Image (tube, rainbow, N blue to C red):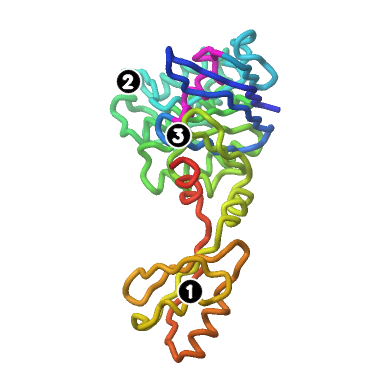
Amino acid sequence: MSIRVQNLTKEYGPQRAVNQISLTVQPGEIVGFLGPNGAGKSTTMKIATGYLPPTEGTVEVNGFDVQTQPMDVRRSVGYLPEHNPLYLDLYVKEYLRFAGSLHGLRGADLSRRIADIIELVSLGREQHKRVGQLSKGYRQRVGLAQALLHNPPVLILDEPTTGLDPNQLTEIRQVIRDAGRDKTVLFSTHIMQEVEAVCDRVVIINRGQLVADGPLSQLRTASAGEGVVVVAEFETELTAPEVLATLPGVERVEPLGKGQYRITAGPATDLRAAIFRLAADQNLTLVGLRQQENSLEGIFKELTK
């Protein structure tokens, strides 16, 4: 396995930022690492890259222990921190040449690799500018380029799409997907659509503790076990909305205004046919009916509230 975290704890004085978390990320897996601000995501990533020592527990990356084999870990990892540290006075290609040299790349091999990475992250138009002249979105691309430059087997990306516009988001998501074909990718984000579009698996932590770990489909299924929600829209407000509460399995009816009602039923209950029949029997004009999917955002809020 490419990343193995066992009983990891990190304390800053009396504050426990990470509390006994364990997880593994397999080769070729793209895992979204989620949690509210202060949950311990960045701390865990910094420990996994060798920037911080753990208080307790072990972390292995690409088979190397971060405490006893830190240089091997650093050779194995491409890391983009949350606050992207760049040398603003260097030109883009100059900075990438410097970053590549730190990983032992030289001469023609380094030049070819820089050219390939610049094309991969779409930095072609900006490659002759100083880093300090770039927008925040392009600086993120430079940070991602240096993380990919030495072709590491593991990528650890902390908020890699911060500051990108919608077009850039699409491009960088594709870069991450492509990287995931032959690399292990662990990345954090607050953009739920990004996780749904890119990730094989989701890990959620809250207050330093692991609260969810699994494929998104599995998390949705588990969340659905708490109840099914349907929104029914009628042409006009119902004179007796309590009739909806008489349907089998219904637990709660909430008026939303303008003829709309949110109806919550028990697990594995499909209310749509029953609502349609009720409308027909009572001469009610039903103009809309949809079952709400358990979104990742809803699951996240429920697990971290």
- Stretch of the chain drawn in magenta: 39-55
Q: Between residues 24 and 197, which one lies in front from this camera angle?
A: 24
For the point 52% across and 60% down, the residue is 293
Name the secondary structure under disc 3. Answer: loop
Pointers 3 and 1 in contact (CB under 8 A)? no
Q: Between residues 30 and 126, which one lies in front from this camera angle?
A: 30
Lower sequence index among marks 2 and 1: 2
In screen coordinates, is 203 left or right of 190?
A: right
The residue to which callout 2 is attached is 88
What's the residue type where badge 1 is placed?
A: Ala
**Mark 3 → mark 1, Cα distance in angstroms:** 47 Å
Instruction: Mark yes or no: residue 199 visible.
Output: yes
In magenta stretch: residue 60: no
Please identify, in this view, whether the residue under mark 3 or under mark 1 is nearer the observer.
1
Lower sequence index among marks 3 and 1: 3
**Mark 3 → mark 2, Cα distance in angstroms:** 18 Å
The residue to which callout 3 is attached is 160
Q: Is residue 111 above or below residue 180?
A: above
Lower sequence index among marks 3 and 2: 2
From the image, which quarter does the C terminus lie in? Answer: top left
For the point 39% across and 21% down, the residue is 85
Name the secondary structure under disc 1. Answer: helix
**Mark 2 → mark 1, Cα distance in angstroms:** 63 Å
* Crowding at mark 3 (Cα within 10 Å: few <14, some 14-19, many 20+): many
In screen coordinates, is 43 left or right of 222?
A: left
Q: Which mark is residue 245?
A: 1
Q: How many marks?
A: 3
In screen coordinates, is 224 left or right of 256?
A: right
Image coordinates of residue 57 in percent, x first then y, are 61, 17
